[in-house]
Image (cartoon, rainbow, N blue to C red):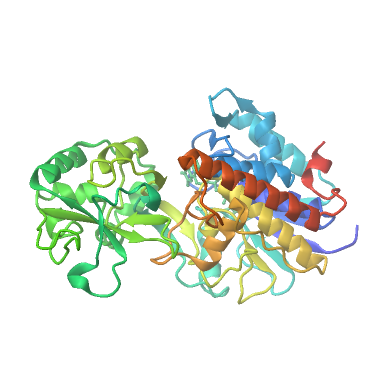
Amino acid sequence: MSGPVINVYGAGLAGCEAARAASSMGVRVRLTEMKPGKYTPAHKSPGFAELVCSNSLRSDSVTNAVGLLKEEMRRLGSLVMAAADATRVPAGSALAVDRVAFSDYITRAVLSDPLIEIVREEAVSVPEDGITVIATGPLTSQALADFIAGELGCPGLHFFDAAAPVVDGSTVDTGIAFYASRYGKGDADYLNCPMTKEEYDAFYDALVGAREAELHGFDREAQKDPEVFEGCMPVEIMARRGRDTLRFGPLKPVGLSDPRRPGREYYAVVQLRKENEAGTMFNLVGFQTHLTFPEQQRVFRMIPGLGSAEFLRYGVMHRNTYLDSPGRLGPDYMLSSRPGVYFAGQITGVEGYVESAGSGLVAGINAARRALGLPRAVFPEQTMLGAMAAYVSRGGLGPFVPMNANFGLIAPLEQRVRGGKAAKYAAYAERSLAAVEQTRETLFPRGKETCNESNS
Ligand SMILES: Cc1cc2nc3c(=O)[nH]c(=O)nc-3n(C[C@H](O)[C@H](O)[C@H](O)COP(=O)(O)OP(=O)(O)OC[C@H]3O[C@@H](n4cnc5c(N)ncnc54)[C@H](O)[C@@H]3O)c2cc1C
């Protein structure tokens, strides 16, 4: 068989999606997977696209960001979505799958694809020439991680993710929270949530008593590293050092006053920092945490101003290999310093099963287009696929943190819609799906090359 070949490293969610996207465009793929010769600490089965933890792919409603992402992927012929739809199990409004059947479906599709050759070995370097998609995931093997950080010129590769929760800016009660910077220095970019002593005490007691998420053995090991631990101590652990420790740390109230209530002093203040120019996303400063997601919602909503806050992402602390992508990867997921080298999946800084597969779809389409001599395809930021790629390539205002799909990333609506949040999300969905249809028409004018056709 002749024609261009692209290398894809890692037969996980992103790698399988990328490989199949490329093969469905007529491009040959060499897919390298180190299992079963070598396993990451989380992978256990020799099959491809292994779901290492939950079997849920989260909401299936298009008025939810990850639900919308799924629908966009379906319309572009995603293999992962075809597998999920074929192997779903009852889970209310969520899309959950039988994990064995899901992996079997994808493994069979990839193995039976005449354009995909499988190589069962650990990838440790990237060829000088040609096209390679690196989709080796959050637990990329050390040898390849060293190569990426060294010879591939991506210093600042992160091995641990300690992220604070991010809330939707429009759900913060600005009748309570106020814009100000400490001592009035610089622009008033922070939203400050003031606390009285009674509010602080109630919050403190809830925080120190809240339930923490279970740790994987390898996460526990990573956190024994004092640099990791002291550098990003979970807020609940810091709180346990003493009732007032937070008030002298991230909740320090000094130098912060509400311009609407001059002279008023507060017992403690939680600061929210803008995550993006548009101010749709705000980060709880210093709130990296191990708490379970429901506990984060319960406890952090006790902070004045956050009573109805919507969490766009929860705080996490786990081992996670990811690039410092902004400025390094383009919105097509290609490394600017090494044309022809693409990244896909969690290693790019997207977070979650569906998000990883979604970035694999975009990277795979782009790698194939490059192999075919076609210009790159940048997805519109009105779509979740495009919004995630834009976030990865540009980042936000603060340090780059991995992010799951959320409506804080998507381009704001051109016009205000009446009807509250539900109407706003429905408008995002309608606009995005129209944009995806248009993109599909442009990329696959005859409608032949999408994976849907070849899956049927
Ligand atoms: C422990 C854990 C639990 C998680 N739980 C969830 C969850 O419940 N829900 C959720 O949405 N997300 C979860 N995630 C986050 C993330 O969405 C998943 O890890 C997802 O599988 C990432 O997809 P990926 O394709 O980027 O990587 P993976 O699916 O991990 O695929 C990477 C593949 O590359 C292979 N590989 C690694 N190094 C090499 C190499 N050098 N050469 C060849 N092959 C290599 C691996 O064996 C693996 O098959 C979890 C992550 C971890 C680590």
Q: Is residue 148 shown to the viewer in this render?
A: yes
- Using the image as rendered, state which of residue 10 and residue 199 is in the foreground: 199
Rendered location of residue 151, percent (x, y): 56, 75
46 lies above or below 194: above
Q: Please state, as top left, top right, bottom left or bottom right, where the C terminus lies in the image.
A: top right
Please provide percent x and percent y for residue 2: 90, 61
Toward the front, the furthest residue is 418
On the image, which quarter does residue 338 sit in? Answer: bottom right
Residue for point 61% across, 74% down: 336
Residue 293 in the figure: left or right of residue 443: left
Return the x and y of residue 110 as percentages of the image width and height.
75, 44
Q: Is residue 92 left or right of residue 226?
A: right
Residue 193 as seen in the image, left or right of residue 68:
left
Which residue in the rendered view is the most extreme toward the right?
1
Q: Residue at 25%, 53% (x, y): give it.
A: 177
- Residue drawn at (46%, 41%) of the image: 420
The image shows residue 361, relative to residue 96, as above or below, that is below
Q: Quadrant of residue 335?
A: bottom right
Instruction: Between residue 373 and residue 179, name the one nearer to us.
Output: 179
Which residue sits at x=50%, y=53%? 138
Give the position of the N terminus as an image quadrant: bottom right
Q: Considering only vertical position in the picture, is 67 above or below 163?
A: above
Where does the image place residue 325, in percent across and percent down from the top left?
Answer: 52, 66
